[in-house]
Amino acid sequence: MPKMEPLCSLLGINSRKLNKEENLLLEMELFVQIWKELKNFFILQQQNYFYFAKFPIDKENAVLDAVTLNLIIRDILSTEEYSLLGIAYYTDTHEDIIQDVIIGYNLSPSITFLRKIIELHRLVRRDLYQTIIKKITVEYLTHVGAQP
């Protein structure tokens, strides 16, 4: 079963009826929504930092975009389920590159690395992702139900 199928069924979408391009577009849309929810999650966690730093809202969003991946990696490490070496192995990425992301030298790693980090984060923080998926599903169903 493809990774997207359970989510698609929750949304009432038969992914088998979509062509390859449509499935890819759907996956990208869901990825964007999950990323948005992760940013919101980390905004709440880092609220004091942003309050004391006194960033204007537009700067705060730019800073959060730049550090969300850093925060995801730190969150994975904080669970102690994976070490830096374990993350490197799972993502098939050299430890130095991951370290560069953590310390802020690499602010734009590859989309493949980002996808693998989110997959790993989803494994160690299932409860968070279940909450995110429920929220996305409710928003989608509310939006679809509101259309004529």
Image (tube, helix red, strand yellow):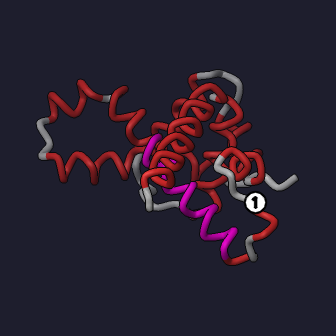
* Residue at the right extreme, as displayed: 1
Q: Left or right of 62: which side holds 10?
A: right
* Residue 101 seen in this snapshot: no
Q: Which quarter of the rendering shows the C terminus?
A: bottom left
* Residue 134 seen in this snapshot: yes
- In the displayed structure, would residue 49 be above or below residue 122? above
Q: Left or right of 114: which side holds 119?
A: right
- In the displayed structure, would residue 27 be above or below residue 57? below
- The secondary structure that most of the magenta stretch takes on is helix
Q: Residue at x 68, y 52 (%)?
A: 12
Percent across and percent down for residue 133 are: 59, 39
Dot 1 amino acid type:
Asn
Between 28 and 54, the one lying in front of the other is 28
Q: How many marks?
A: 1
Between 5 and 63, the one lying in front of the other is 5
Q: Left or right of 116: which side holds 16?
A: right
Q: Residues within 10 Å of mark 1 (few under 14, many from 20)?
A: few
Q: Residue at x 73, y 37 (%)?
A: 86
The reply to whether the magenta stretch includes residue 26 is: yes
Percent across and percent down for residue 56 are: 12, 46
Percent across and percent down for residue 145 are: 49, 50
Q: Residue at x 22, y 34 (%)?
A: 50
Report the residue marked by disc 1: 14
Between 86 and 147, the one lying in front of the other is 147
Q: Which residues are magenta?
A: 22-37
Name the element at disc 1: loop
Percent across and percent down for residue 52 are: 15, 28
